[in-house]
Structures are given as structure tokens and as C-alpha cells.
Amino acid sequence: MITLDQISRRYASDEIETTALDTIDLTVEAGEFVAIMGPSGCGKSTLLNILGTIDRPTDGRYLFEGSDIATAPESALARLRRDRLGFVFQSFNLIDELTVAENVALGLTYRAMPAREKRDRVAAAMDRVAIAHRRNHFPHQLSGGQQQRAAIARAIVGEPRLILADEPTGNLDTENGAQVMDILSELNAEGATIVMVTHSPSHADVAKRTVNMLDGRILSSARRAM
Ligand code: ADP
């Protein structure tokens, strides 16, 4: 599904240049569940942002389902994000003024489909993560775990090919974190490809492969023994 070929990302300022990613090679096959680990500052967020086409590499090729998108025009990347990608963040990133159902519907913004189909899809996504009973609540009326479930519903409502999760359990207690990991694991079993940054070794163990990073490079990539 994804091939990163010698991807680098450098940040230049007046005095210093930081190499956030240093000639990274990474392949992710459809159906994989990959955890990315490594100390703070090693380039995990930069890597996830590049995978999500929110940031562009300074050098290298990024193939998404066969097309090189490292230098694709912004309009093509916006389409790719809309149709193929789902994002889950550590801090949930729900809109405070919108209800759960309205937040989930944001995942279908600019998708051409009948209003009825949108409603059905939003309902199905909320059911999928067991948040439908809170559909008319606002984010501040929900626990952290419920907010993250709503955010996952928003990420999956468009049926993305790839889910990118940046420390999805980072703000959750043990029980809610485990629930979110169960949901991600089930979505993966149903066919979603997932790349997740995490600091939790036990949550990385839920993934099928762990990629360890250090100083902008990939140190190792190990598949979980089944
Ligand atoms: P991680 O997610 O593993 O903590 P990041 O990808 O955020 O690491 O950062 C990798 C490196 O790139 C760090 O040294 C960081 O300081 C640097 N960096 C990240 N974003 C910027 C930026 N916008 N400008 C300059 N340096 C940056």
C-alpha cells in the first residue's frame, strides 16, 4: 500500500538545520497494523505527518497505492486525505461546539453522497465504537475514552484505506486505553491498515509489527510472533 523510498525531512533555520527524518525506507502492506516507537524527538510525528500528507518530504519518494505523491499537487493530496485516510490524535481534536454526531459527520465533509446515506454512515460509525447513545452530547460532556471513540468514529466514517493514529491512548487511563486498542485491533481484523505512534510497549504489542526509531532513522522493524 505504502512505500517510503529514501525519505528525508530537514528543517532549516538561520543557524541550524535539523534532520527530522534521515533517508527512511519503509513499506506498509494493506492489512498491516504497525506501531512506531522511539524516544521523544526521534521523528515519529514527522513520519506520521508525511504518511498523512500533512507534511512533505525534503527528499525521497512516497508511493501510495503505486503513485508517487511526494511532489503531487496539494489538490490531489487533499482528495487523498478525504477519500483514503483517517486520522486519530492524542488530544482527540473534536470540535467543542458540535455534537458527537456532527463531529462524526465531519469525516464525510465534501463527500458527494445523498444526505440519507451520510446519516446512515454516521449512525453505523457511532454504533461501531459504541458511542451512539451519546450522539447528541458535546465533547465536554464525555469522558476521555468516549471522546476518543467519537474521534475514531469520525476517522472511520469515510471507510478509509489507512488509519493514522498519533498516540491515540496517550491521554487515556489504562481501562479506556485498552478499550481504544481493542477497537483499533478489531478494525484491523476487519481489513483496515493502521499505522500508530505509541509510547506504550503493551499497546505496541497489539500491533502486528513494531518499527523502532532513533535520531530520524529506523533502527529495527520486528513482526510480532503469532
Ligand atoms: P517525535 O514525534 O518522535 O517526538 P518529531 O517528529 O516531532 O519527533 O521531531 C523530530 C525532530 O525534528 C526533532 O528534533 C524536532 O525538534 C524537529 N522538528 C520537528 N518539527 C520541527 C519544525 N517545525 N521546525 C524545526 N524542527 C522541527
Image (spheres, rainbow, N blue to C red):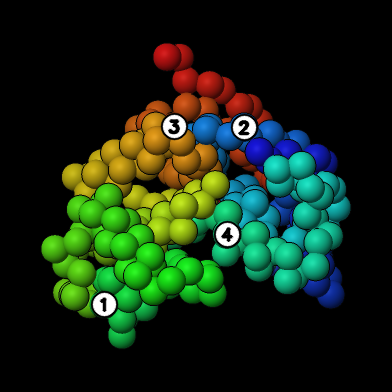
The quarter of the image holding the C terminus is top left
The residues bearing labels 4 and 2 have C-alpha atoms spaced at a distance of: 18 Å
Tag 1 residue:
99
Quick one: SS at disc 1? loop
- Residue at the (63%, 27%) spot, across then down: 220
Residue type of the residue flagged with mark 1: Thr
Whether residue 5 is visible to the viewer of this picture, yes or no, is yes
Residue at 31% x, 62% y is 120
Q: Which residue is mark 3?
A: 207
| Mark closest to the chain's N terminus, 3 or 4 | 4
Mark 2 and mark 1 residues within 8 Å of each other at the beta carbon = no
Mark 1 crowdedness (10 Å alpha carbons): few <14, some 14-19, many ≥20: many
| Residue beneath disc 2 | 29
Q: Choose mark 3 or mark 2, whichever is in front.
A: 2
Q: Position of residue 197 (x, y in %)?
A: 50, 46
Q: Are marks 3 and 1 in contact (CB under 8 Å)?
A: no
- Nearer mark to the viewer, of 3 and 4: 4
Q: Secondary structure at mark 4?
A: helix
Question: Would you name the residue on which mark 4 appears?
Answer: 83
Q: Residue at x 22, y 49 (%)?
A: 176
Please identify the quarter of the rendering in which residue 152 is found: bottom left
Inspect the image, locate mark 3, and give the three-letter code of the amino acid beneath it: Ala
Q: CA distance from mark 3 to mark 2?
A: 13 Å
Residues at discs 4 and 1 in contact (Cβ within 8 Å): no
29 up-or-down from 126: above or below: above
Q: Which is in the foreground here, disc 4 or disc 1?
A: 4
